[in-house]
């Protein structure tokens, strides 16, 4: 039996080669791998000796040869294949051990140039892997060090690999090649021309639209179950996760995160990091039930909690400031599933030691002022699975500023109301449609979410405020989409709202504007909507 070993990541390769040699398997190798094995005293034949052709072009060409691919592709059960090998003096290769040039790791490094990336595109490795994987009935192909143990177990037990293992290795090999080629495609698709020159620095900032994106993800961990206990689940991350995104966080303590924990944590973190002032977001079942800005972590949490103390029980809490001892003492008084922040003081960590089940996540915030969605820690694309298909869209990363607002009523909002309108609009973006959000003084006062009728969302928001003993007098209201009739406006005004922000664009805009003028409230149009289904 002959084994060809040619690896970039040499983790465990010496020990694996020693075990193969002890089983009487002849070792072939290339370049640095051959030198390493020879230095360890292993009898190894360089591929150049077999092909009788030296490595050339700085190592770019070394295994692209019939004596390599013939040995991999020949079907042992076909006499004509074996006769051809004999005629041309080609030995079979029964085991291939290859991992590829570190393309993904190279382009992930700061300052990676196009030349660096191109040089780390493996050619010979994928070609050999494909040959071996295609001929899986006769060849075992190993593409990862974590496969060494299972291969050795079978070789030691029976002297050969089972069909089941060879097939599994083949599938894994093709998956690896697909991932590798996808990473190269995504990288090259992100390189842009600037003044007729290729960009020399790669930042994974742009994802191509449907039909042009390979969506490369790497598995982070298996989860206990999915949304429900009968469903299986796992967490994957982008090949190059954006700075400040949830998957870049580090869990400091607590139980393993569940599927629902992660989904809710993402909703909370995406919302809280959209604020520059100290902010707190409390999420329950994918919707913010309390959001506030304040002087610090404690102040913003205290205000957010007031919105809906009942729903906050067992919620997910995100802050965009360090959690200090004072904030920790207050937060620890409630039952919380997950607490996220850019950092935790030593005093805060001491407080939560007594609550070992509380999951603490430390996530660095992305830098403000980033030029691209990726630099700002945002997804460029959103995806939704449908029956045998996938919906892709550019992410809702629209940001609203004061100059974008169009006042459409006789009454003008005050500057304070304008600031609250922008705050309410930010929150509404993260509330499931139909969304109605009452706010005042930089905090939510009532949130209505996920109803089939916008009218019901408005009523629920008012009811929630009543349960929390919060007055809605003098509040502003954000509606994620336009009011199709005046009845929704009447509900929020009856509840105490004096100012409303909505996208506009309804056939009955004039009717709703007239109603606002009749009720003596201010209304502004944003020109965009924030449906979130």
Image (spheres, rainbow, N blue to C red):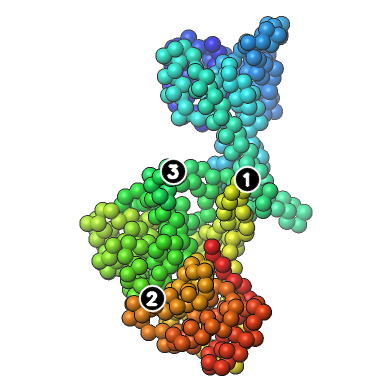
Location of residue 356 in the rendering, given as x and y in whole percent from the top left corner: 26, 53
C-alpha distance separating marks 3 and 1: 24 Å
Quadrant in the picture for residue 70 = top right
Mark 2 vs mark 1: which is more N-terminal? 1
Asked whether residue 501 appears in the rendered view, the answer is yes
Residue ID at (46%, 11%)? 159
Residue wearing tag 2 = 464
505 over 262 or under it: above or below? below
Q: Quick one: SS at disc 2?
A: helix
C-alpha distance separating marks 3 and 2: 35 Å
Mark 2 or 1, which is nearer the eye?
2
Location of residue 265 in the rendering, given as x and y in whole percent from the top left corner: 42, 58
Neighbor class of circle 2 (other Cα within 10 Å; few <14, some 14-19, many 20+) is: many
Residue wearing tag 1 = 214
Mark 3 or 1, which is nearer the eye?
3
> Does 279 sit left or right of 519 as displayed?
left
Residue sticking out furthest to the right: 196
Neighbor class of circle 1 (other Cα within 10 Å; few <14, some 14-19, many 20+) is: some
Q: Quadrant of the N terminus?
A: top right
Mark 3 vs mark 1: which is more N-terminal? 1
Residue ID at (65%, 48%)? 213
Residue wearing tag 3 = 232
Neighbor class of circle 3 (other Cα within 10 Å; few <14, some 14-19, many 20+) is: few
Q: Nearer the viewer, residue 212 or 520?
A: 520
Callout 2–callout 1 Cβ contact below 8 Å: no
> So how many labels did they put on this image?
3
């Amino acid at each position: 039996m002959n084994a060809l070993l040619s690896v970039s990541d040499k983790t465990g390769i010496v020990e694996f080669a020693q075990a193969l040699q002890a089983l009487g398997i002849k070792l072939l190798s290339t370049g640095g791998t051959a030198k390493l094995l020879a230095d360890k005293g292993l009898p190894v034949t360089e591929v150049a000796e077999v092909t009788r052709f030296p490595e050339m072009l700085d190592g770019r060409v070394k295994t692209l040869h019939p004596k390599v691919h013939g040995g991999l592709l020949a079907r042992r059960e076909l006499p004509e294949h074996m006769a051809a090998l004999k005629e041309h003096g080609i030995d079979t290769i029964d085991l291939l051990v290859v991992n590829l040039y570190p393309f993904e790791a190279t382009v992930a490094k700061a300052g990676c140039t196009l030349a660096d990336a191109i040089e780390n595109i493996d050619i010979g490795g994928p070609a050999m892997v494909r040959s071996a994987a295609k001929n899986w009935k006769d060849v075992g192909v190993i593409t990862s060090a974590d496969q060494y143990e299972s291969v050795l177990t079978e070789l030691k037990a029976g002297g050969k690999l089972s069909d089941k293992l060879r097939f599994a290795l083949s599938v894994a090999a093709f998956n690896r090649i697909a991932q590798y080629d996808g990473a190269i495609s995504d990288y090259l698709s992100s390189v842009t021309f600037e003044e007729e020159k290729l960009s020399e620095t790669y930042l994974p900032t742009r994802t191509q639209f449907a039909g042009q994106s390979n969506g490369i993800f790497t598995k982070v961990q298996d989860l206990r179950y999915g949304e429900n206990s009968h469903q299986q689940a796992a967490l994957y991350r982008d090949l190059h996760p954006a700075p400040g995104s949830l998957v870049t966080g580090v869990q400091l303590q607590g139980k393993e995160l569940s599927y629902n924990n992660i989904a809710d944590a993402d909703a909370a973190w995406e919302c809280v990091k959209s604020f520059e002032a100290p902010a707190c977001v409390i999420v329950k079942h994918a919707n913010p039930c309390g959001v506030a800005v304040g002087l610090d972590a404690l102040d913003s949490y205290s205000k957010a909690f007031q919105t809906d103390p009942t729903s906050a029980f067992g919620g997910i809490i995100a802050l965009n400031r360090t959690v200090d001892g004072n904030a920790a003492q207050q937060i620890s008084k409630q039952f919380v599933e997950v607490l996220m922040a850019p950092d935790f003081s030593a005093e805060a960590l001491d407080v939560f030691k007594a609550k070992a089940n509380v999951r603490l996540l430390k996530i660095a915030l992305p830098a403000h002022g980033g030029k691209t969605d990726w630099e700002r820690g945002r997804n460029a694309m959103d995806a939704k699975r449908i029956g045998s298909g996938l919906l892709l869209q550019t992410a809702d990363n629209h940001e609203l500023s004061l100059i974008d607002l169009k006042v459409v009523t006789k009454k003008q909002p005050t500057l304070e109301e304008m600031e609250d309108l922008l705050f309410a609009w930010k929150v509404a973006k993260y509330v499931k449609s139909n969304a109605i959000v009452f706010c005042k003084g930089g905090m939510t006062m009532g949130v209505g979410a996920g109803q089939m009728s916008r009218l019901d969302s408005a009523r629920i928001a008012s009811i929630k405020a009543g349960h929390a003993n919060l007055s809605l007098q003098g509040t502003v209201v954000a509606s994620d989409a336009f009011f199709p009739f005046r009845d929704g406006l009447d509900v929020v005004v009856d509840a105490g709202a004096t100012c409303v922000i909505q996208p506009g664009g309804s056939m009955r805009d004039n009717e709703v504007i007239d109603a606002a003028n009749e009720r003596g409230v201010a209304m502004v149009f944003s020109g965009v909507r924030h449906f979130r289904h």
